[in-house]
Image (cartoon, grey):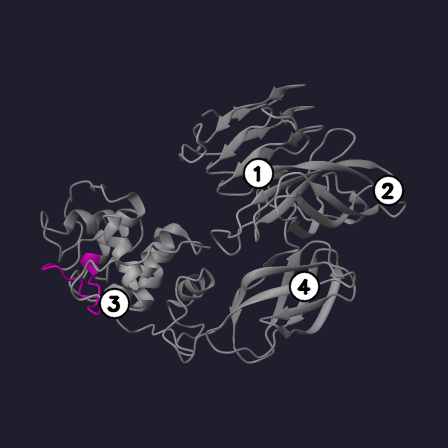
Amino acid sequence: MCQGSTRGAVGTTVQGNFIGTDLSGTLRLGNSGHGIYLDSVNTLIGGPEPGEGNVIAFNSGNGVGVAIGAVGDSIRGNSIYGNALIGIDLRDDGVTPNDPLDTDGTQNFPIVTSAIPLLPDSGTNVQGTFNSLPATTYTLDFYANPACSPRPHDFLQGQTYLGSTMVTTDASGKVPFNVNLAPTIQPGQQVTGTATNPNGTTSEFSQRIVFSLSRASGAPSPGTPITIFGTNFEAGASVLIGGAPATSVSIPDYTTIYATTPSLPPGSVNDVTVTDTDGTTGSLRNGWVADFLDVPGSNQFYSYVITLAANEITSGVGGGNFGVNLSALRQQMAVFLLKGRHSLCYTPPPCTGVFADVPCPSTFADWIEALAAEGITGGCGGGNFCPTSPVLRQQMAVLLLKTEHGSGYVPPPCTGVFLDVPCPSTFADWIERLAAEMITGGCGGGNFCPTNPNTRGQMAVFIVKTFNLQ
């Protein structure tokens, strides 16, 4: 593992390193910032030939951050994945949208519209469009990513290098591409690409054309105005929210759409899809949540409930309600914790019949047994799990911290923070550590209320804060 910076360097080459991980590519050894930071001229990070690429993973910043003013930095053939921000960040300011004729000083990325495995094991067909400077030749590199993104709003990085092709733009700066690459992706894998210009400057990874919304939720009834941010929006594009057409669609520029939401079921979580007139389409998964009937915008837990729903941790209790004031049950907590820790891609292994009071199979059995297998809880005693019992606040402190830090975690000794939590006592260390991590400040008046049951609204706050859900 290493961390790289090329501040002020000229003509540097960085190849064959493991940055943020070990030789297996699975151990999380990420740097506290970017994997590599480029403030340089004509640096080569990786390369298209075997052994030239770097593995850049699990860093707390970008995989590769590029400073304003860096010129001619080629980033090709690497395996970039699992970084907290984005894979390649030009200007070090988040995803940079494309612009017509590529006049903004950063290199546009290609738009991948289709990636299909050519079975049996005959390669991959990748199609899409690219726009940049007119009558110029570019190198497009393509990368495969897992079929499931851990969080619905994650941007693509580039885990597995697939190969490259050359394209030349026409007089309007545009060119379609249709290329067959030798490696064969698995069905459902997501493919992204970069463009490298004749000066050697590489773009960011290509993304869905819908980046974000000005707000993530609103009334189920029609009429909420929203702004959609993204790239490559063309006049005449259509907008669907949860499959229903948005109204009052207006497209002032290449990166902005104004629209008004349609009628949607209460508590529903909806994709936002934009389709250009040329057929280019992209979706923001779970981009819009129609408010739950029992969680109006004025509710103190509103933003946390919306975030929990958008991350597919829970869909509520049915009938358009979240159950915000109901007690969070131990069986529900098993799902919340494991989805929060492992992401929406996680599926627990089938149950085997561990707890006497948890029938196998049953709705929560897989989740409950997986939680126990990870050492987060041993149940409630006597071979039982007590699945329908409420989770008490003192129990919640242990469950959250063990899920976050691992089953072997031991919190520091208590000092006596809360009036109603004796120090020392069974749960005191856990409770005070939870407060120190700013997951909760207690129940007010200097108390923690350790034996009170948690409501589902409170649990939404705890899960969102513990796992830093966005």
Which residue lies under the disc numbered 3? 329
N-terminal-most mark, 1 or 3: 1
Which label is found at residue 319?
none
N-terminal-most mark, 2 or 3: 2
Which residue, as the protein is rendered here, is positioned at the far front?
A: 120
- The amino acid pointed to by label 3 is Leu
Give SS at disc 2. loop
In space, the residues marked 1 and 3 are separated at their CA atoms by 41 Å
N-terminal-most mark, 1 or 2: 2
- The amino acid pointed to by label 4 is Val
The magenta segment is: 381-395
The secondary structure making up most of the magenta span is loop
Where residue 91 sits, quadrant-wise, is: top right
Q: Residue at x 9, y 50 (%)?
A: 425
- The amino acid pointed to by label 2 is Pro
Q: Picture coordinates of residue 358 (x, y %)?
A: 21, 65
Which residue, as the protein is rendered here, is positioned at the far right?
A: 171
Q: Residue at x 49, y 28 (%)?
A: 19
Nearer to us of marks 1 and 3 is: 1
Q: Nearer the viewer, residue 17 or 396?
A: 17
In space, the residues marked 1 and 2 are separated at their CA atoms by 30 Å
Q: Does residue 389 show up magenta in the picture?
A: yes
The answer, for residue 254, to whether it is visible in the render is yes
Q: Are marks 4 and 3 in contact (CB under 8 Å)?
A: no
In space, the residues marked 4 and 1 are separated at their CA atoms by 28 Å
Which residue lies under the disc numbered 2? 134
Which label is found at residue 160?
1
Q: Picture coordinates of residue 183 (x, y %)?
A: 62, 39
Which residue lies under the disc numbered 4? 274
Give SS at disc 3. loop
Q: Nearer the viewer, residue 142 or 172?
A: 142
Q: Residue at x 72, y 43 (%)?
A: 180
